[in-house]
Image (tube, grey):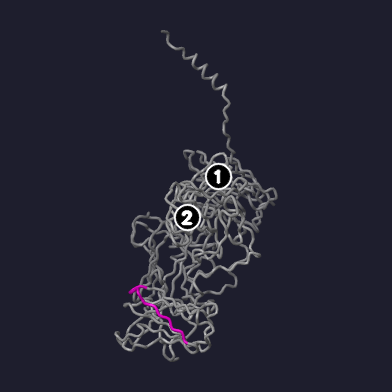
Amino acid sequence: MKASNPIFFLIIIALWNLSCEREIPTFPTINYVPCDDINVVADPNIVTDFECQSNVIIENIEVVRNPLETGINTSRFVGKYLDGIAADDALTFNFSGIDLSTNGVFKMIIKSSVAAEVKVILSGGSSDPIEAITVLNGENTWAVYEFNFSNEDSGDYSMVRIFFNEGITSDGTDLFYLDNLVFDVSVFAPDPCEGVTEDPSVINDFDCQENYEFGTPDEPVVEKIPNPDPSGSNTSTFVGSYIDNGQEPFDALIIEFGQPIDLSLTPQFSIQVWAPMQGNIIAKLEGGTAIERSVQVQNVREWQQHTFDFSDALNAGNTTLVLFFNAGATNGTTEDVYYIDDLKFINIPDPCEGVVPDLSIISDFECQQNVMLGLDPMVDAAPVVDNPEMDPQNSSVSVGQYTDDGTDRFDALIINFEDPIDLSVNSVFNIKVYSERQMPLTAKLEGGTPVELSTTVDVINEWKNYTFDFGGAIGNGNTQLTIFFNAGQADGTTTDIYYIDDLRFTSQECPVEQLDCSTVMTDLSIINDFDCQQNMQIGLTAQSVPVVANPNISCENRSPNVGEYIANGTEAFDALITDFGTAIDLSVENQLQLKILTERAVPLVAKIEGGTQPFETPPITIDTVGEWATYTFDLSPGAGNGNTTLVLFFNFAQADGTTTDLYYLDDIRFVAP
């Protein structure tokens, strides 16, 4: 037998391919352009921002997407420059009309891992060339660099040359990203600090309050530099640059005042820090009775304000402030750079300043102490103390401490309002209690027609909120609230201690929602809420899911009306079908959400169909019975398929129900992920 001819088979395959009509999918190309704004007014002082202010095209610079859209530079496009191997390689461009009298500072934002010396030379006019030099930090993050030509304000120049490591040959791989090249306002503009009065509480803000020098002008311990990241909590023009030996666990910046630090009015030390790494910052007062405080740096490479409270060292006689950066650690380098600013002593702000009294609150023992506790105006029946156990139920710093005579069955905390207590809106009395014993607790309204309610303190050594609903006492004219701890019992001591907090009147918990549909604007993301947003009929007929009164108004669902759906639980795939009549838009809001109230824990599936490709979600379980619960289905995998119908399978694929399985539905809607 002869061997098969491979050429013959190739021809057959080619003919087969040509004979078949095959649709090759095409996808849109994502294009980005540096600037699509056609109405940009050129700023004559901007050389280029590589976007809408590209006023000068600089040779040898490639416009690229920003490789690090964070910090001080979130531009989408920047310039990319690869320095040549020659010692005199430079970026050169003409920029006529440079007015150094008003805009004498040439600025650039640069990102590079090369710690290069950068020189800018102005030339090309009738004046002799001038130059300015700075050094890049080499940290490969965006930073602002300035070249000050303000003292040449009468010069004539038309050309700019920028050298990176002039005089040094390289291998041609030194990469620099540039952005926002601009001639900015001269530093010899009107003095921004003119008329500023010295504030001795400020150690140094590196702007107008430089009241303490770090080191000497010739050997500064902290160097004043332009703010490398004017953003967030610190947009100051200048800041301090401090180099810390990160391999010495307690290398420190020491500030010696030469006399005891006056903390009488300003007991807190505050500092802005831009840290290159996470770590512990310690502020320590020395020279008298030493005291130290610490904070943890969480967010690196961004400005954060840190405050250290030295209010318990008012008369300690300390004369020195010591700052430890990344204290106790040795995971840094010998030249870790920390930027610092606004070192000052401040007063403790009044946390209650500006707080508007809320008269529904009797006392929270902090900013809302609106009614005196006890009948003796000279004696505080529940003095303010520190919270003995800050927990999720009560994280307040301050609470009240009530001492009860536990041998007297009717000893009580009495609160006299003088006027009738208005219960028309807020009729529920709340009190948080921290107790070491379980006990009966009674609240009684008196002074009009008395009403007394009781509960049990059933949690010990933890905070719990207890409520008393006095809705039945509205209009009774009562003026006094009496609280009995260990009510009716005499088995305690004469000094039983109870901690209390947040005594207040609130409204009834989660009353039915009051709706005025005439003022509600249509929200088409809501399919049907059976109240004001009935934008789509649920089911194939109006009788599929009729509107009924909410059988269980609760905090989970306060709606007055809901939908009632009766499923045939003996049919494994009986379903509730809703036809939208058009393709369901799942481009943004692609999560189906609905509330369900049922007495059965059953599987539930959502499906969309009627388009080119149906999609069915994995089953979820209705796991809450007897109460309203919210369930969500992710329909995003079915987006764009043109499906027009939503199908809900209750008790999916099961036939163990009845012909009248009952489900209440509400707030059926699409939401974004």
Label 2 vs 1, first from the N-terminus: 1
Residue indicated by mark 2: 661
Query: In the shown orientation, is residue 9 left or right of residue 290?
Result: right
Report the disc number at residue 391.
none
The reply to whether the magenta stretch includes residue 610 is no
Of residue 439 and residue 375, the one placed in the foreground of this image is 439
Q: How many marks?
A: 2
Specify start and end residues of the magenta stretch as a single range: 450-462
Which quadrant of the view contains residue 640? top right
Q: Secondary structure at mark 2?
A: strand
Of residue 378 and residue 338, the one placed in the foreground of this image is 378
Residue indicated by mark 1: 639
Image spot of residue 523 (x, y percent): 61, 57
Q: Are marks 2 and 1 in contact (CB under 8 Å)?
A: no
Q: CA distance from mark 2 to mark 1?
A: 32 Å
- Label 2 Cα neighbours within 10 Å, binned few <14 / some 14-19 / many ≥20: some
Which quadrant of the view contains residue 290? bottom left
Image spot of residue 535 (x, y percent): 62, 55
